[in-house]
Image: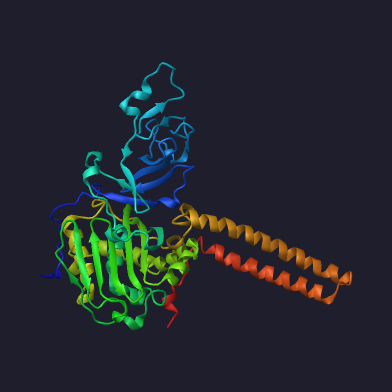
């Protein structure tokens, strides 16, 4: 029996413990083993670091027990400890203090419980580093929120992965990616098309504390891709699965990782299981950074208005169906998700949103929200800076060589060659500058606003 939620409560029935869950915090391939990395999860500052002796990723509280300085500003020592940058206190992979440099040699101060910092359980699965935010005693009995189809056909998937620190709440992100009908307008013409907008019905199975499953019999693009099954796995994971599209199985996987009130990390996976080897080869030879630039543009299509929308919603009637008018069958996934949130609670329930950010450039910045933490984009950015410098040098050298060639009466073909190379180098310098800028900031206005 398929149920379609038609109303959303205004009060929480049974609070969900958001800390009692595993969260992915990073793609493992983007983690830098040479330095500690800061991450905020549910308002708690964490430090991620590679323990070279144990050869494992470790997650600790990012507060030194001495004076609460962030350990993420410190270093990883040769003997496998995390050293505080302030006074050199060093910590092991389980959070115990290994040494206090300014304590007497016979001191046992480092053995005190007060010297120990919190250790968070962590493990790697499906290419992601997961962290358990709750009571460590419950970690082993709490299932990892992985995507089963990715394990069912190992070696057959081609993955387009990205991440972005988003200036709106994890609940807003999940509501948005569950909303199948917004794609036609918000993401026109990148991955949507206004011409595909039409009436359709979504079906939702029972909403439980664990989430829900939804069905779209026709599927996207007026049925061209086939039926879609949608899964929401509480509290942070959802995926759309189109098993029988014309070119194979297609999925959209999104983790909405709650960092702070009004902020989250979006971990996005686009797995493809192609019927043909040709698209697999295309994906194989497409640079990862190139995909990230395009995926950032897609995320930015709704980044500004969702940042503002969630603040409007916070000020509206707490009963979602009174605050918002959702009369169509295409809204059922959104209603189901809001039913779950109202029944079991959102993260940071006692906190208010910070004032809205009015600077568009701040909402669309890319460097600190993605590039600085992405190994692929960092490598590409370094390369393009060098190429741009080389282009500038070439433009100047060949440009200045032209008048010398005239004075020395070089052959005409040489002079033409100098001019052409100089102009091409100048053009490359300009184009590389435009490309480099895309690693720092997004574009405005969005493409949909000026494309018919």
| Relative horizontal placement of residue 38, taking residue 332 as reference (left or right) | right
Q: Is residue 205 above or below residue 40?
A: below
* Color encoding of the figure: rainbow
**Residue visible at 39% across and 41% down in the picture:** 56
Q: Is residue 311 visible?
A: no
Q: Quick one: which residue is furthest to the top in this view?
A: 106
Q: Quick one: which residue is furthest to the left in this view?
A: 1
- Kindly indicate the quadrant of the structure image that contains residue 416: bottom right
| Relative horizontal placement of residue 449, taking residue 326 as reference (left or right) | right
| Relative horizontal placement of residue 67, taking residue 227 as reference (left or right) | right
Q: Is residue 368 visible?
A: yes
| Residue 79: image location, x then y, percent | 46, 31
**How many badges with numbers are in the image?**
0
**Residue visible at 46% across and 70% down in the picture:** 444
| Residue 19: image location, x then y, percent | 25, 47
| Relative horizontal placement of residue 312, taking residue 443 as reference (left or right) | left
| Residue 196: image location, x then y, percent | 32, 81
| Residue 439: image location, x then y, percent | 51, 61
- Kindly indicate the quadrant of the structure image that contains residue 118: top left
**Residue visible at 38% across and 65% down in the picture:** 303
Q: Quadrant of the C terminus?
A: bottom left
Q: Quadrant of the N terminus?
A: bottom left
Q: Is residue 59 above or below residue 179?
A: above
Between 219 and 259, the one lying in front of the other is 219
């Amino acid at each position: 029996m398929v149920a379609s939620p038609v109303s959303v409560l205004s009060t929480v029935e049974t609070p969900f413990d958001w800390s009692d869950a595993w969260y992915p915090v990073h793609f493992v391939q983007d983690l830098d083993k040479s330095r500690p990395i800061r991450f905020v999860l549910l308002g708690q500052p964490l430090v991620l670091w590679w323990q070279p002796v144990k050869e494992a990723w470790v997650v600790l509280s990012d507060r030194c027990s001495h004076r609460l300085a962030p350990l993420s500003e410190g270093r990883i020592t040769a003997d496998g400890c995390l050293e505080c940058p302030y006074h050199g206190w060093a910590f092991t992979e389980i959070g115990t203090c290994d040494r206090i440099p300014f304590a007497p040699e016979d001191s046992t101060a480092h053995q005190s419980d007060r010297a120990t910092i919190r250790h968070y359980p962590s493990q790697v699965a499906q290419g992601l580093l997961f962290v358990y935010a709750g009571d460590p005693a419950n970690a082993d009995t709490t299932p990892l929120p992985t995507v089963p189809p990715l394990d069912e056909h190992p070696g057959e998937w081609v993955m387009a992965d990205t991440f972005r620190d988003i200036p709106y709440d994890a609940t807003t992100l999940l509501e948005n990616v569950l909303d199948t009908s917004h794609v036609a307008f918000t993401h026109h013409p990148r991955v949507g098309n206004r011409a595909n907008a039409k009436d359709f019905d979504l079906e939702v199975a029972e909403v439980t504390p664990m989430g829900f499953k939804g069905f779209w019999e026709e599927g996207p693009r007026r049925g061209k891709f086939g039926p879609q099954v949608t899964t929401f796995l509480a509290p942070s994971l959802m995926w759309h699965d189109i098993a029988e599209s014309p070119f194979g199985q297609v999925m959209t996987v999104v983790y909405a990782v709650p960092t702070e009130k009004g902020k989250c990390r979006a971990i996005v996976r686009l797995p493809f299981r192609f019927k043909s080897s040709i698209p697999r080869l295309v994906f194989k030879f497409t640079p990862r950074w190139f995909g990230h630039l395009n995926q950032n543009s897609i995320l930015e299509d709704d980044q500004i208005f969702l940042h503002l929308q969630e603040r409007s919603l916070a000020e509206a009637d707490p009963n979602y169906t009174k605050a918002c008018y959702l009369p169509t069958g295409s809204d059922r996934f959104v209603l189901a998700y809001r039913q779950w949130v109202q029944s079991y609670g959102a993260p940071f329930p006692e906190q208010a949103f910070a004032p809205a950010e009015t600077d568009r450039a701040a909402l669309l910045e890319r460097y600190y929200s993605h590039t600085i933490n992405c190994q692929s984009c960092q490598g590409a950015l370094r390369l393009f800076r060098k190429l741009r410098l080389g282009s500038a040098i070439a433009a100047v050298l060949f440009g200045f060589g032209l008048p010398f060639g005239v004075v020395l009466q070089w052959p005409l073909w040489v002079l033409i060659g100098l001019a052409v190379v100089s102009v091409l180098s100048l053009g490359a310098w300009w184009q590389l500058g435009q490309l480099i800028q895309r690693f720092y900031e997004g574009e405005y206005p969005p493409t949909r606003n000026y494309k018919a």
